[in-house]
Image (cartoon, helix red, strand yellow):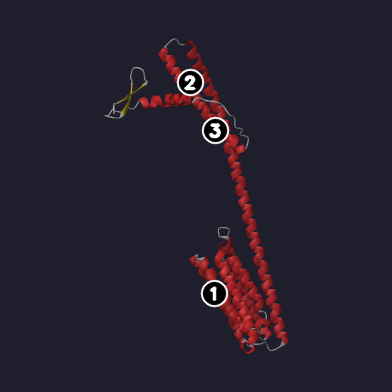
Amino acid sequence: MLAERYFGKHLDLRVRLFNTLALGGILISLTMAVSTLFTGAGPIHFLVNMILALVSFGLLFYSRKTGNYQVSYLLTVICIFLILFPAAFFVSDGYRGGMPTFFVFAVTISVFMLRGRTALIVTGLELALYVGLCVFAYLYPDSVQHFASEVDMLQDIILSFVTVSISLGIIMHYHFRLNYEQQKELEKAREEALALSRVKTTFLTNISHEIRTPINVVLGMNEMILRESTSDQIRRYASNIQIAGKTLLSLINNVLDLAKIESGKLELSKENYKTADLIFDLVVIGRESAARRVWCSKPKWTAICPVPSTGMLSISSASL
């Protein structure tokens, strides 16, 4: 569809604005060309407006085929605003006709289409050119083709004013509507992201609570083994299970803390701890997996090898 191709939501805001401008330029130029048949502006004025319509159509076609809209913006400024508008100025009674209204249109659209320093440079160039044209037409009035009568000039001014006002009104309305739609889409995406975050937090909280229950059962049963067992080997194994279980429980509590952080309900509390106990717990956790690997001793290096009879680590150092 034509609307989806040139004004679809998949297109950038400036791209859709440019397409609106190009189509509007075609309609405006054709309207002004037809109006010359009734205002008596002459065939040159008619020809200039037809060229404007053709150039607008060419830019729209080029931008759609290549996708290079930045080049299209600059070509619009150069071909239409800096060349064809000044040409129409001299065949439309200069600053006494309706072309100064189109100069306002050109500067406004350049601000919308271009960005940053380029917009400042181009609009400054346009303003300097248009002011220069008005001064030149004042100093050399014979360089301007005048209307045949005061009525023709008045008709041209009214038609230009109405056409540009409607065009700018439509473009501004369309621009703000697109911007409003994008804001709504961003707000909707934000709400969906927040909803997904809440779902994730709820899931983590629930699963953490569910995991804590069997771990507490395991730790409770293991505590009974520590109390009732008379075997040192079993008690050592049970002690390792107790340390690993408490570490796992601490990790699960950290997951719950993550949910509190996201909800803004986390409160920090200061507690004393012993670094030696922390290191010992880490050694216990990693000892069993490390005991399955044998690091062969080399001269001047430390060797770590498992002791099969106890499952403990034996650390020996070669003399340097």
Q: Marks 2 and 3, Cα distance to the nearest angstrom?
A: 20 Å
Q: Report whether 284 appears left or right of 92.
A: left
Residue 102 pos. (x, y %): 64, 75
Q: Residues within 10 Å of mark 2 (few under 14, many from 20)?
A: some
Q: Is residue 14 visible?
A: yes
Q: Residues within 10 Å of mark 1 (few under 14, many from 20)?
A: some
Residue 241 pos. (x, y %): 46, 21
Q: Marks 2 and 1, Cα distance to the nearest angstrom?
A: 79 Å
In the structure shown, which secondary structural element does the residue marked by tag 3 occupy? helix
Residue located 61% across and 88% down the image: 143
Residue located 57% across and 71% down the image: 122
Among all residues in the image, which is located at the extreme front?
Answer: 320
Q: Report whether 171 appears left or right of 243.
A: right
Instruction: Name the quarter where the N terminus is drawn.
Output: bottom right
Sequence-wise, which precedes: disc 2 or disc 1?
Answer: 1
Of 318 and 181, nearer the camera is 318
Residue type at mark 3 is Val
Residue located 58% across and 41% down the image: 197
Q: Circle 2 sits on which residue?
A: 242
In the structure shown, which secondary structural element does the residue marked by tag 1 occupy? helix
Mark carried by residue 255:
3
Tell me which corner region of the image, top left, top right, bottom left or bottom right, holds residue 20. bottom right
In the structure shown, which secondary structural element does the residue marked by tag 2 occupy? helix
Question: Is residue 109 placed above or below 153 in the rendered structure?
Answer: above
Residue type at mark 1 is Ile
Mark carried by residue 78:
1
